[in-house]
Image (spheres, rainbow, N blue to C red):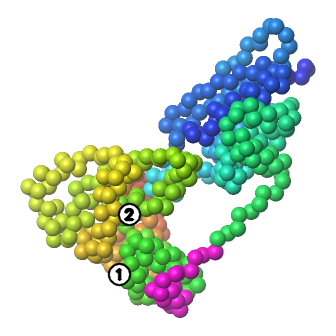
């Protein structure tokens, strides 16, 4: 059988990761090395930031007769697949591009899809299953965190991918030829060569320098140190990590007195270390509920703007405009007001009928504009009066009711009740939906006949789908046995 001379390469990347630049480098590599090479791209739809397949096909130049090269990859006929993210490697496997003839080179980091982030429970796809499939299906799988390498070398992921392709030995070209293709591109040559070199070494199994794990930061204020000492003295070791993180979170959310209330509530809870650990974790999350004040605070933090600039690799002289989509409902607005005023508006049909249309639609908010930055900063500053808001009064009552249920329950059921707080997260409709599911489960528990296993079953059903159909089915009476 004649040796195959044609080389088929598929590059699967996300928008903004330089997949087009990588494909151009590969085309130039082939042409400069005496091959006829052609590159095409097929944009994807609605996947994270927009996935695209770049396809390069090349064959040694054998004379005046021009070969006919394909425009898209064909399942079962791809020699090399390069994926810029782990899920893209999985997508290549599902589409049949990866077979026992394919060298699969992929980054092992994740860029989570909206459906993964918005899931009621942990909606992340299994990275372990994708890696296992890659190792099983491909002729060879070379995988490492290319995004981290790009960050460490001050380059971009496309140059690291190009280096990994060179280091794999999958193409019949020298390292020098790869580097010359980068130089010929003429863009950020030094940075790209750094990324290339690091990718080359990683593909050849050379040890990457391990990032040092940052120690847990000690509290810097007198109040913070006093609270940390209290955690150490009053709680079992299993609960201390969550409690300390809870203290930090609530001091950032409100103040030291609010973090002290958190520890007071934990002190009033007697039970096993497991129960205290679960409650410490979920109580901190509930007490830092996401109201409009918290959302505004997080949107205008300097650290957030710096993070966004870093993610898009903006230079010092470049302007970055940041636009958010926000849709506060009338309920969220009223709950931010002083309790008496907010309750009066919500209970008044006339006020509600007049005000609701003003908040019927979401709006795009440019947080980098002076007008919206000042507006959100003023709202964030309202946190000093948060204790007087309607939402604060409502949430503290809900939290006390939840803690009372936990204190009165049998040990195993108490742990499941603590974990039910997972249903309550986010804000707006997401919060309302989760709270509704939680309240339905608690109502069934109070009706009697529901043990720890029954609570766990209802909890898992509530996390199964956003529409609540699984929970509806689980709550349906069955042969006189409430709650299943």
Where residue 275 appears, as percent x and y from the top left, is: 50, 80
Where residue 311 appears, as percent x and y from the top left, is: 56, 50
Whether residue 484 appears in this view of the structure is: no
Q: What element carries label 2?
A: helix
Label 2: few (<14), some or many (≥20) within 10 Å?
A: some
Q: Which of marks 2 and 1 is in front?
A: 2
Q: Camera-side residue: 367 or 261?
A: 367
Q: What element carries label 1?
A: helix
Where residue 423 appears, as percent x and y from the top left, is: 41, 63
Q: Is residue 315 above or below residue 121?
A: above
Query: For residue 297, which numbered disc appears in the image?
Result: 2
- Which residue sits furthest right? 1
Label 1: few (<14), some or many (≥20) within 10 Å?
A: few
Q: Which residue is drawn at 43% across and 70% down?
A: 285
Quarter of the image with the C terminus is bottom left
Q: Earlier in the sequence, mark 2 or mark 1?
A: 2
Where residue 320 appears, as percent x and y from the top left, is: 47, 47
Q: Distance between the residues labelled 2 and 1?
A: 31 Å
Name the residue beneath numbered marker 1.
Answer: 404
Q: Is residue 327 above or below residue 414?
A: above
- Which residue sits furthest top? 65
Question: Are the residues tagged 2 and 1 within 8 Å (C-beta)?
Answer: no
Whether residue 146 appears in this view of the structure is: yes
Quarter of the image with the N terminus is top right
Q: Which residue is drawn at 78% across and 39% down?
A: 165
Report the magenta residues as a range.
215-234
Q: Which residue is drawn at 18% across and 47% down?
A: 357
Q: Is the magenta stretch mostly helix, strand or loop?
A: helix
**Rendering quarter of residue 196:** top right
Judged left or right of residue 175, residue 199 is left
Q: Magenta stretch containing residue 21, yes or no?
A: no
């Amino acid at each position: 059988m004649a040796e195959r001379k044609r080389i088929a390469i598929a590059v699967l990347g996300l928008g903004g990761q330089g997949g087009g630049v990588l494909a151009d480098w590969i085309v130039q590599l082939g042409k400069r090395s005496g091959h006829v090479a052609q590159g095409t791209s097929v944009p994807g739809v609605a996947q994270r930031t927009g996935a695209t397949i770049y396809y390069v096909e090349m064959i040694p130049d054998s004379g005046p007769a021009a070969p006919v090269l394909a425009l898209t990859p064909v399942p079962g006929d791809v020699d090399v697949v390069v994926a810029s993210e782990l899920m893209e490697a999985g997508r290549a496997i599902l589409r049949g591009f990866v077979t026992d003839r394919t060298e699969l080179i992929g980054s092992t980091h994740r860029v989570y899809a909206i459906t993964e982030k918005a899931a009621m429970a942990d909606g992340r796809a299994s990275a372990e299953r994708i890696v296992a499939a890659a190792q099983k299906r491909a002729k060879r799988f070379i995988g490492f965190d290319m995004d981290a390498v790009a960050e460490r070398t001050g380059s971009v992921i496309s140059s690291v991918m190009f280096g990994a392709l060179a280091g794999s030995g999958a193409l019949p070209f020298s390292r020098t030829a790869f580097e010359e293709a980068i130089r010929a591109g003429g863009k950020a040559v030094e940075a790209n060569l750094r990324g290339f070199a690091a990718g080359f070494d990683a593909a050849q199994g050379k040890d990457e320098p391990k990032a040092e794990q940052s120690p847990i930061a000690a509290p810097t204020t007198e109040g913070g140190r006093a609270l940390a000492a209290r955690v150490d003295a009053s709680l079992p070791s299993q609960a201390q990590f969550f409690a300390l993180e809870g203290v930090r979170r609530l001091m950032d959310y409100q103040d030291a007195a609010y973090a002290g209330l958190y520890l007071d509530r934990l002190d009033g809870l007697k039970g096993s270390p497991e129960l205290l650990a679960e409650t410490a974790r979920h109580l901190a999350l509930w007490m830092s509920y996401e109201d409009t004040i918290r959302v505004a605070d997080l949107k205008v933090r300097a650290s957030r703007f710096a993070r966004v600039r870093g993610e898009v690799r903006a230079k010092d002289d470049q302007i970055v405009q940041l636009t958010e989509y926000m849709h506060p409902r009338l309920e969220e607005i009223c709950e931010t007001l002083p309790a008496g005023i907010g309750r009066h508006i919500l209970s008044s049909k006339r006020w509600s009928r007049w005000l609701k249309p003003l908040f019927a639609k979401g709006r795009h908010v440019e947080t980098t504009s002076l007008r919206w930055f000042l507006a959100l900063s003023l709202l964030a500053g309202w946190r000093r009066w948060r204790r007087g808001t309607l939402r604060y009064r409502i949430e503290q009552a809900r939290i006390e009711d939840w803690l009372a249920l936990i204190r009165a329950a049998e040990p195993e059921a108490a742990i499941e009740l603590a974990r039910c707080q997972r249903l309550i997260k986010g804000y707006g409709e997401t919060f309302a939906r989760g709270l509704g599911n939680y309240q339905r489960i608690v109502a069934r528990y109070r009706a009697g006949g529901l043990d720890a296993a029954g609570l766990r079953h209802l909890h898992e059903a509530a996390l199964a789908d956003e529409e609540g159909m699984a929970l509806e089915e689980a709550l349906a009476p069955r042969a006189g046995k409430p709650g299943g």
